[in-house]
Amino acid sequence: MEKKDRKKKWRENHREEERIRTKKWRKKFPEKARENVKKSILKNPEPSRKAKRNWNKNNKNKKHAEYLASKIQIPKGEMCELCKTSLAKERHHPNYNNPLEVMFLCVKCHKGVHFGN
Ligand SMILES: [Zn+2]
Ligand SMILES: [Zn+2]
């Protein structure tokens, strides 16, 4: 075995050891472990706060986009843009930042777009 390979191996083993030790410690002191997690969150609150702000902004965009889109009439007899076999009944926003850009979809395809099937 090469020297650097042995070194790598040692580090891998060591990491595994460390992981097991942490796991055992967490099992032994669940309160302390939880406390540690809490501390690390408190120490670094920025990402979650930022995520929340982003979520609010996205949600506002979405609401506004849906309001604007509700004024767009789906032409009578318009077929779904995806399957082209069912009548379009719903509006879908590919991007809420472009509230007036909507796709006309049937109920089934619209569900598929959002829930992935
Ligand atoms: Zn469809
Ligand atoms: Zn949609």
Image (cartoon, rainbow, N blue to C red):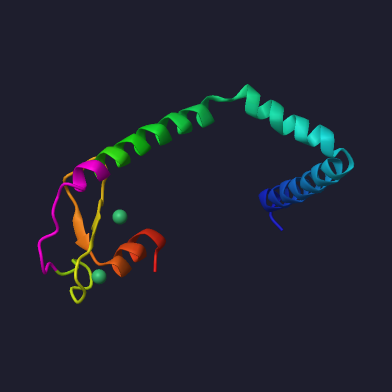
* Residue ID at (81%, 46%): 23
In this rendering, the answer to whether 59 lies above or below 45 is below
* Residue ID at (31%, 41%): 62
Q: Quadrant of residue 116?
A: bottom left
Q: Nearer the viewer, residue 25 or 111?
A: 111
- Residue 92 is left or right of residue 35, and the answer is left
- Does residue 98 show up? no
Figure label count: 0
- Numbered range of the magenta stretch: 66-78
Looking at the image, which residue sits at the far top?
A: 43
* Residue ID at (83%, 35%): 31
Q: Nearer the viewer, residue 34 or 4?
A: 34
In this rendering, the answer to whether 6 lies above or below 83 is above
Residue 76, image x, y percentages: 10, 65
Residue 51, image x, y percentages: 47, 33
- Does residue 100 show up? yes
Residue 60, image x, y percentages: 33, 35
Q: Nearer the viewer, residue 14 or 47?
A: 47
Give ligand 2's quarter of the image: bottom left
Quadrant where the N terminus sits is bottom right
- Residue 83 is left or right of residue 16, and the answer is left
Quadrant where the C terminus sits is bottom left
* Residue ID at (30%, 66%): 107
Q: Nearer the viewer, residue 60 or 23?
A: 60
Looking at the image, which residue sits at the far right?
A: 28
In this rendering, the answer to whether 94 lies above or below 85 is above
- Magenta portion: prevailing SS class: loop
**Residue 99 shown in magenta:** no
Residue 10, image x, y percentages: 76, 48
**Residue 72 shown in magenta:** yes
